Amino acid sequence: MNLPERYAAVRGQSLALAQPLSDEDCGAQSMPDASPVKWHLAHTTWFFETFILERFEADFQPFHPAFRVLFNSYYNGIGDKHPRPQRGLLTRPSMAEVRAYRAGVDARMARLLARPSTELQSLVTLGLQHEQQHQELIVTDVKHLLAQNPMQPAYADTAPLPSDAAGTLEWLPFNGGVAEIGYAGGGFCFDNELPRHRTYLAPYELASRLVTNGEYLAFIEAGGYADPALWLAEGWDRVRSEGWAHPLYWRREADGRWTEFTLHGRRPLDLDAPVMHVSLYEADAYAHWCGARLPTEAEWESAAALPGLRQLFGACWQWTSSSYAPYPGFKPAPGAIGEYNGKFMVNQYVLRGSSSATPEGHARASYRNFFPAHARWQLMGIRLAR
Amino acid sequence: MNLPERYAAVRGQSLALAQPLSDEDCGAQSMPDASPVKWHLAHTTWFFETFILERFEADFQPFHPAFRVLFNSYYNGIGDKHPRPQRGLLTRPSMAEVRAYRAGVDARMARLLARPSTELQSLVTLGLQHEQQHQELIVTDVKHLLAQNPMQPAYADTAPLPSDAAGTLEWLPFNGGVAEIGYAGGGFCFDNELPRHRTYLAPYELASRLVTNGEYLAFIEAGGYADPALWLAEGWDRVRSEGWAHPLYWRREADGRWTEFTLHGRRPLDLDAPVMHVSLYEADAYAHWCGARLPTEAEWESAAALPGLRQLFGACWQWTSSSYAPYPGFKPAPGAIGEYNGKFMVNQYVLRGSSSATPEGHARASYRNFFPAHARWQLMGIRLAR
Amino acid sequence: MNLPERYAAVRGQSLALAQPLSDEDCGAQSMPDASPVKWHLAHTTWFFETFILERFEADFQPFHPAFRVLFNSYYNGIGDKHPRPQRGLLTRPSMAEVRAYRAGVDARMARLLARPSTELQSLVTLGLQHEQQHQELIVTDVKHLLAQNPMQPAYADTAPLPSDAAGTLEWLPFNGGVAEIGYAGGGFCFDNELPRHRTYLAPYELASRLVTNGEYLAFIEAGGYADPALWLAEGWDRVRSEGWAHPLYWRREADGRWTEFTLHGRRPLDLDAPVMHVSLYEADAYAHWCGARLPTEAEWESAAALPGLRQLFGACWQWTSSSYAPYPGFKPAPGAIGEYNGKFMVNQYVLRGSSSATPEGHARASYRNFFPAHARWQLMGIRLAR
Amino acid sequence: MNLPERYAAVRGQSLALAQPLSDEDCGAQSMPDASPVKWHLAHTTWFFETFILERFEADFQPFHPAFRVLFNSYYNGIGDKHPRPQRGLLTRPSMAEVRAYRAGVDARMARLLARPSTELQSLVTLGLQHEQQHQELIVTDVKHLLAQNPMQPAYADTAPLPSDAAGTLEWLPFNGGVAEIGYAGGGFCFDNELPRHRTYLAPYELASRLVTNGEYLAFIEAGGYADPALWLAEGWDRVRSEGWAHPLYWRREADGRWTEFTLHGRRPLDLDAPVMHVSLYEADAYAHWCGARLPTEAEWESAAALPGLRQLFGACWQWTSSSYAPYPGFKPAPGAIGEYNGKFMVNQYVLRGSSSATPEGHARASYRNFFPAHARWQLMGIRLAR
Ligand SMILES: [Fe+3]
Ligand SMILES: [Fe+3]
Ligand SMILES: [Fe+3]
Ligand SMILES: [Fe+3]
């Protein structure tokens, strides 16, 4: 696919994700950490308008002056922002207007893409990668919203097949030593994947596959949520203050059976599927209970280059014990685009791999996803190390 | 109008209020005290379904079992309730489904109304009065929602005319003595307006009209929001913690002129119109600044029976200094309906009169509206006493 | 006693209350609503210094300039105040310095009291009444502080005798009609007891004695804290959010028996003693459960002038259903002294009578004590009306 | 010094720190993160009683059964804990009783120390190191407490001399490569300093000395607290929500000069002294403004083994960019002692060096101090890297 084709494909995919939803579904915000689908659709468009059209169009006029503020996420360099917790109150512009906004920007982008400079190409690529990140958030934010509804509505109607048997968890050994991590190829990567650099690893082992719902259920039934000795102190505080007793969307029904809220509505727990929607605290406590630990991001990335590991990509993101920090020699991009990653490098933890909600072609071994240790609404699970 | 006609008229009016709004507008909740329009439309329908259809239909089947919980406001006697602050997350049922819910209940109500018993008539009348109360809330909640939007959208397009000159404020004297207050006629009233009873009033005076925006602006410009000596202690705490410096929807523009957000969008402040959207604290401080005070509800009701007072009804609700309390001998209705009023009789203050958002025919001199002292989003203003 | 003698007696009584306490006990603040004993001792002294010495001494010099801010409670007219929740952090001045402050001010007051003007006499009387109010707070605040300590230490060592049998609760009828309430005599009263004025009362009945611990226990055992139908809506919210299941200092021990924390440490519940440390919400719910109600303050005061009621004074304060509001024609004193009462007249409820912690000679039938509906740490109990 | 001598010296030093303080000073708690001095004195004693006396005394009897709960800090393995934010409410036991508790435990420890096993020696050493950590907290917590007092009282009376001129900041280069960090010697270290292990470092430079107050003032005057581009996103949120505009104890006086609250009271800002009482956010923003960065803990420790760096120890702790995490192969001690460090390894950042409040002999290059990124009340400053 050439760039204009890729542009069209990625942009179309965002609208496709909204297709099963009503305008009402697209406007609601279930918590400050999540955003309405409509906001995601507008904000990704704002990104192209602000960082590309405004720069490359000779006679740039904003689609709507107010959108500059409404759909800015966090770029202080651009000016004011609408307060994040109030995104669900923006009943205007309507979904129809946001669709028109997308169409208008797409048409103007198409003209620029007819004669792209190198710099433009690189910004468009960034914009598409950005849009793909929001596509994953659309899925996780909608899932969270629908889960709040006592009617437990489904996003998608087709019922998925149960997972195949998970198979034995094997421990794969790795030698360690001085390793190189960080993006190496010639394609796109985010600034936080650079520079590629050396790091030292002691010999280690990784689990061949992810922890399953069935294995995690054993932890619950063994009293894992009731034993402070297994938990980080902060994690234990959360367990108590939030009343955590299982992953985010699980529920023990009146008859004792476990169910999980999914994009297909509430369903019986699939014991062979990877456990998801656990915080770093829960992942760490589970590992502790097993006599294992979580991998560092360097261990994960280093091992991912070698054969043997299953479920690296496409199942769920995998918590690492690595705090999100700049690589040695990290340089953010100049200007407002430089706010993309660097300023979030504190009190967050890195997740590696990708999930079933990650768009096609968006995953790679050097990719650094990151969330606070208490986050649970993403598709986040557990690969063990020791 | 006979009862079936009145039923149709009132129910139709609720839909008419939603007519200028999109489905997105109808789903959002701007704060825990406010509710989405869709919720109001469903909850008023739930009232008829729960308190009338369920009781009088031989073969009653709920329209949808989940609605029993979703659209219960606070009737503990009925069972579970959906948490109030999460009403804005109910993207399902859709507005279309809620319209169908209304139509379905209306059709069944029509059958019952063809042969109404006395008890049924009385419950229907209560249901319609209840619906009218929610009609006023639809207006005030929508106003609050739209005011949060930086684009300051209008609910209604037609621009209103500026007010006529307010005219001189005159003081009308009343004799006091043993007076009777409470509902006296043979028509409908809420249980909190009964029993009619004696009370003793010292001689007093009431202002002939409401305090205007222009008069209130003078209070602001004289430093009213900066002088603790004028304020109740709790009010002064609010002024400081919330940064209050003017009524809720006022704004001082960059050029120094004052504007007010209205249902017609943001407009220049109308100096002759009654000041609105002030808390009891602000009303009390303003009165203090004038050397006056707020009336008691008994003074207001007693005076309203005599000639001379203007703007009693149809402009805005008027704060009284009376705490909302049961009248001597007050008896709530039996059963869940009895939760309508009595259990809210603490830490609220009575407002009298009615507002421009009060439905036709809903106002009367004995009517007791009530809100917490800090509430500002209703159409609430000031009549002075001394 | 002449005024200098009364001055000495009241001032000495404050120190006597602190006598069983260590300096450490006197410095701690158990919650924002309570104050350290040391603060009470200093603040009551500040009152004399600020409102009397500063006004009547020709060559007034403050004892310590910083005390003007540190020990101001809420008089905005006097200037800055130390934030209330941080009173427990004032380890300096020490108790020894506060004792010196008291002695210094007392010596200077003695000189003024040798030749008192009428105005001085009236201010001194107010200062002593103020000090007596704080004496009751010293007791209740110390009780609250010691109750937080897992060791449950006693303030006083002598063990009290159990109460006599409470005797039958009788209903005493009163005629109602136009009554006069408010202070009538020629002695001291607070501004909020004036002016004496007429009010109209429907015929009513009051309980001859207070509700006992045993009676309240029956309410608990009948599930009173689990039935929302008994509660004001706000009260029910508190029951749930705070987990209320009994009066503040009660505890159900492992063996099922009930105990109560008292100034003599934790002791078995005295079933014949009046129930205390209940909020207005609990008092109202209990009354509701009995098919009774709480009296209004006018009913209480009117009946107190007639024979028959027991436990009016000296047991515990008695919640009324009356919101704390100005009497018709109320005029606060001019200047900062005028902040004493009026500005608190919102969202509080009146209690009548007096408690075992009320200083000798401080009680009278027209006295209006007031606290928010959720307050429980004062000696507050229940007299029923119907 | 032999072990009994060291025991006596360290234990005596804790009391010496309390010597300038009144019992009232020792009882107050200025915020949940800080503890009363009395609590520190009792808790360090509890540590010896619980982990040594209870284990090694044949006929162990607790000094007071309640102290087991009152003075447990966070060891879930030991049982219940008194809630941290309520430590300031423990007016009993008194300081005199806590002194008696210390004396009683010390006497019993002396008997055990007469015939110490290897295991006992190692636990006593841990207990003394633990006590030294609390000695530093005594100083910082007292400083915070006194700073809340508007009278700004001094802990120590002797006025310190102003600092010598700071001298030029030089950049010292280090080669990097595979380095070893972690404790290496044969003496005591905490479990979090082990195991010594290899790590890879890119070549780097460190500043020869700490950032001074004068340098930091230039950052302030250049608008550092007003430019979001310099800050981590979380840091910028703090700047806005807490109104940060300078280090914790600084104040700009009415005449424009800067002062700082110190243990000697409020004093003019010493421009040549190292800046202290800044959060990681402020340290990072300052470094960003300089075009520099904070060192990693491995860089710091590695460089500390080489000549050239000044102010490594004894001035103030130095923020690193390293999240507090277990070293590869980390093993906590078995039992409750194992709760000492490991469970805090999330959302905290490592500080290296030591401060003027660190007890003699407690510092070493491998020492890992740690606090949340927003903490400011410790003696924490800035060494730059690049
Ligand atoms: Fe984005
Ligand atoms: Fe309703
Ligand atoms: Fe006072
Ligand atoms: Fe400790």
Image (cartoon, coloured by chain):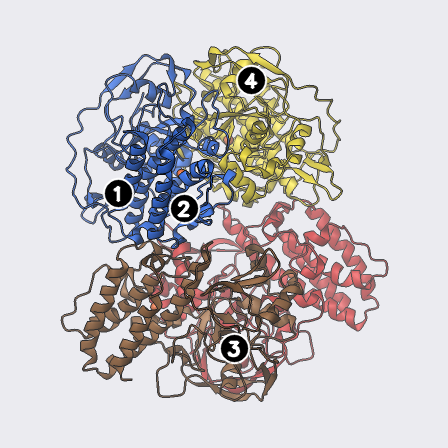
Chain colours: A red, B yellow, C blue, D brown
Residue D210 at x, y = what percent? 55, 76
- As rendered, which of D153 and B180 lies closer to the eye? D153
Q: Amino acid at mark 2?
A: Pro
Residue at figure coordinates x 33%, y 48% from the top left: C99
Q: Are dots 2 and 3 in contact, CB under 8 Å?
A: no
Residue at figure coordinates x 54%, y 52% from the top left: A31
* Residue ID for mark 3: A300
Q: Are dots 4 and 1 in contact, CB under 8 Å?
A: no
Q: Are dots 3 and 4 in contact, CB under 8 Å?
A: no
Residue C238 at x, y = what percent? 39, 40
Distance from Cα at disc 2 to Cα at disc 3:
51 Å
Q: Residue furthest right?
A: A58
* Residue ID for mark 1: C16
Q: Is the residue marked 1 within 8 Å of ligand 3, measured from its CB?
A: no
- Chain containing mark 3: A
Residue at figure coordinates x 20%, y 61% from the top left: D64
Q: Earlier in the sequence, mark 1 or mark 2?
A: 1
* Residue ID for mark 4: B364
